[in-house]
C-alpha cells in the first residue's frame, strides 16, 4: 500500500497538508476522500480531509469524530500508533456490545406511531437512491423515519447504526442486500431486500433466524440461495422495483415523441463491480458471446462454463459468471443488435464510449432524474436488456413516462410477467428489427401504476399488522 491508496496518519503537519491538497479519492466512485491526520497542535486550514488528531488524545478524538480510521502510518512512533489503533478497535467493539445489550433490553411500544430506521452508503448509486425513495414514501405515509448515511470522510458502520437504533427504537427496519438482524430489538420487524447477488447469499454461512425477519427478493434466481441459507418460503416475498412517481411521469409540456429507441444504463464491464475485473478475459467473453448469439447459453451451459473458468483460475467465484459476466454480455450484445436495427437509437450511460461501434449513437451520461424523465418523454421506445428478469427499474421509469418498454426475453428468464400486454418483447436480432411502429395491446403506464413505493409501504405495514395479530393470538392462547 502507499500514501495514494490509504487514509494516513502523519507526524508532520506539513506532510499531511501536502498530501491532503492532492484530494486523492480511494475508490472509483469518488465516495472516499483520502483522510490525512496529523499529530501535534491544531493548525488553521480549510481542507475537510486534513484533520488534527494529537497522539495523546488519539483514541478519544477518533471516537468523537467518527471518521474513518487511518491505516497508513507516517510517524516515528508508528508502533505506538498501531497499538492505539488496536485499543481503539477494542473500544469500538466493547461500545458496540454495550449498545446491543441496551437495544435488546428496550421495550418497543407498537401502540405508538411506527418508527422506521433506514441506512445507506454515501454515493451508493442504486441502493442509495432506492433507500432515499423508501424514506420519502414512509414519511409521506405518516411514519417517523431515521435515515443514516455517511459522507466522504466517514464509514457507515455498525457502531453508527447501533447508536441510532438505541436512541430511535425503531418498529421497522429495512436493509438492502444486508441482513443486520443482530443489531436490533427482537420485537423490531426487519425487512431484507436482496436486489443483487451479494456474497452473503453464496458463502458457507447460515442466516440467523428471527421470527420478525422477512426477505424480499428481486429476481427468482435468489430463491435457491435463500433456501440454502435456511430461509423458508413463508419468510420470502417477490418484490419488484418500484416507481418513483415524483420524478417520473408524463410531462404535459413534452414535445412530440420521436420514433426512436433509447437505452439508459452503464456498461458493466467498465463500471460494474466485480464485472470490470474480468473485462480483459477476452477468451471467456468471446466464448460466452458466441454461445449467446447462437441462443445456446442456457443455465446448464453457464454452470458448466463457470466450473471450467473457476478451475482455470479465470474467475474468483462460480456465481460470477451467471450473475455478473453473463448479464454484462447480454447487455453488450443486445446493444450491438440495436445499432444494426432499422430504428433510430440513442445510448446513455458510462462505459459505452469505449466501443467504436457505439460512438455514433452515444449521447453521454444523464446526471439527474429530470434528465432521464425528459429523454423518456421524448422517446417512443425504451430498450431493456437483462437476461434474468422483466421488471427492471428502467421499465418502471419508462412506463411512468409513457415510453414503450422493449424488453429482451432470454431463454434463462423464468420470471412471471403480469404485464406482457403492456410491453413489447424480443428474443433475437430479427425480432428487434421488427419492433419499429409496433405498440403493445394495453397502456404502458399501467406497469408504473401497479408497482409504486406507496404500494410497497402498504404491503410492509400489512405484514407488520399480521405479525402483531399473530403475537396477540399466541399470547391469548398461552
Image: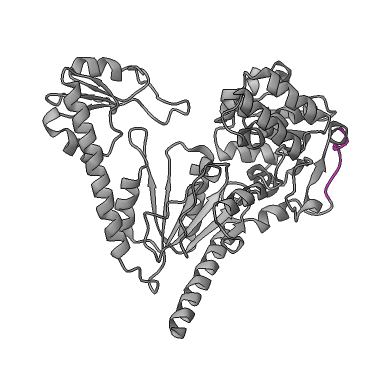
Q: Residue furthest front?
A: 311
Identified at 31% across, 34% down, the residue is 68
Q: Main secondary structure of the magenta part?
A: loop
Where residue 42 sits, quadrant-wise, is top left
Q: Is residue 37 magenta?
A: no
If the image is split into quadrants, where does the N terminus sit? Answer: top left
Front-most of 473 and 122? 473
Q: Nearer the viewer, residue 291 or 335?
A: 291
In the picture, measured across the screen, residue 343 lies left or right of residue 116, that is right
Examine the rendered structure and indicate whether residue 123 appears above or below residue 8.
below
Whether residue 380 is visible, yes or no, is: no
Residue 97 percent across, percent down from the top left: 27, 52
Residue 162 in picture, x, y percent from top left: 32, 52
Residue at horizontal 32 percent and vertical 46 percent from the top: 160
Q: Is residue 278 above or below residue 461?
A: above
Question: Magenta region: which residues?
Answer: 433-440
Amino acid at each position: 500500500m502507499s500514501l495514494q491508496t490509504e487514509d494516513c496518519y502523519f507526524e508532520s503537519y506539513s506532510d499531511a497538508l501536502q498530501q491532503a491538497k492532492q484530494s486523492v479519492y480511494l475508490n472509483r466512485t469518488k465516495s472516499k476522500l483520502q483522510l490525512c491526520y496529523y499529530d501535534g497542535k491544531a493548525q488553521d486550514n480549510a481542507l475537510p480531509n486534513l484533520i488534527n488528531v494529537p497522539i495523546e488524545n488519539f483514541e478519544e478524538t477518533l471516537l468523537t469524530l467518527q471518521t474513518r480510521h487511518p491505516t497508513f502510518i507516517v510517524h516515528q512512533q508508528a508502533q505506538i500508533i498501531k497499538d492505539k489503533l488496536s485499543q481503539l478497535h477494542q473500544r469500538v467493539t466493547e461500545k458496540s456490545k454495550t449498545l446491543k445489550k441496551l437495544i435488546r433490553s428496550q421495550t418497543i411500544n407498537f401502540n405508538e406511531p411506527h418508527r422506521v430506521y433506514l441506512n445507506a452508503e454515501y454515493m451508493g448509486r442504486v441502493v442509495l437512491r432506492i433507500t432515499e425513495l423508501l424514506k420519502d414514501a414512509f414519511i409521506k405515509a405518516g411514519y417517523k423515519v431515521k435515515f443514516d448515511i455517511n459522507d466522504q470522510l466517514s464509514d457507515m458502520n455498525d457502531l453508527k447504526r447501533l447508536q441510532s437504533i438505541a436512541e430511535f427504537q425503531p418498529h421497522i427496519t429495512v436493509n438492502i442486500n444486508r441482513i443486520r438482524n443482530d443489531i436490533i430489538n427482537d420485537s423490531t420487524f426487519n425487512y431484507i431486500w436482496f436486489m443483487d447477488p451479494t456474497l452473503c447469499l453464496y458463502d458457507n454461512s447460515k442466516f440467523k433466524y428471527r421470527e420478525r425477519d422477512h426477505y424480499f427478493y428481486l429476481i427468482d434466481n435468489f430463491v435457491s440461495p435463500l433456501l440454502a441459507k435456511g430461509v423458508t418460503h413463508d419468510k420470502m416475498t417477490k418484490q419488484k422495483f418500484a416507481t418513483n412517481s415524483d420524478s417520473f411521469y408524463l410531462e404535459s409540456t413534452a414535445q412530440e415523441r420521436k420514433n426512436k429507441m433509447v437505452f439508459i444504463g452503464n456498461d458493466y464491464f467498465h463500471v460494474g463491480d466485480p464485472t470490470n475485473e474480468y473485462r480483459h478475459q477476452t477468451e471467456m467473453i468471446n466464448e460466452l458471446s458466441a454461445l449467446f448469439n447462437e441462443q445456446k447459453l442456457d443455465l446448464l451451459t453457464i454452470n458448466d462454463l463457470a466450473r471450467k473458468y473457476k478451475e482455470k483460475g479465470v474467475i474468483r467465484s462460480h456465481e460470477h459468471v451467471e450473475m455478473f459476466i453473463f448479464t454484462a454480455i447480454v447487455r453488450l450484445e443486445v446493444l450491438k443488435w440495436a445499432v444494426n436495427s432499422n430504428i433510430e437509437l440513442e445510448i446513455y450511460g458510462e462505459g459505452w464510449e469505449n466501443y467504436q461501434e457505439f460512438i455514433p449513437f452515444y449521447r453521454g451520461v444523464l446526471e439527474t432524474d429530470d434528465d432521464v424523465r425528459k429523454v423518456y418523454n421524448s422517446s417512443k421506445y425504451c430498450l431493456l436488456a437483462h437476461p434474468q428478469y422483466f421488471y427492471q427499474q428502467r421499465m418502471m421509469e419508462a412506463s411512468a413516462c409513457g415510453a414503450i418498454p422493449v424488453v429482451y426475453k432470454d431463454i434463462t428468464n423464468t420470471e412471471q410477467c403480469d404485464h406482457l400486454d403492456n410491453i413489447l418483447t424480443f428474443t433475437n436480432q430479427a425480432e428487434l428489427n421488427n419492433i419499429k411502429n409496433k405498440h403493445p395491446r394495453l397502456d404502458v403506464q399501467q406497469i408504473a401504476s401497479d408497482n409504486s413505493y406507496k404500494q410497497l409501504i402498504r404491503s410492509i405495514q400489512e405484514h407488520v399488522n399480521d405479525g402483531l395479530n399473530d403475537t396477540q393470538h399466541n399470547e391469548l392462547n398461552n
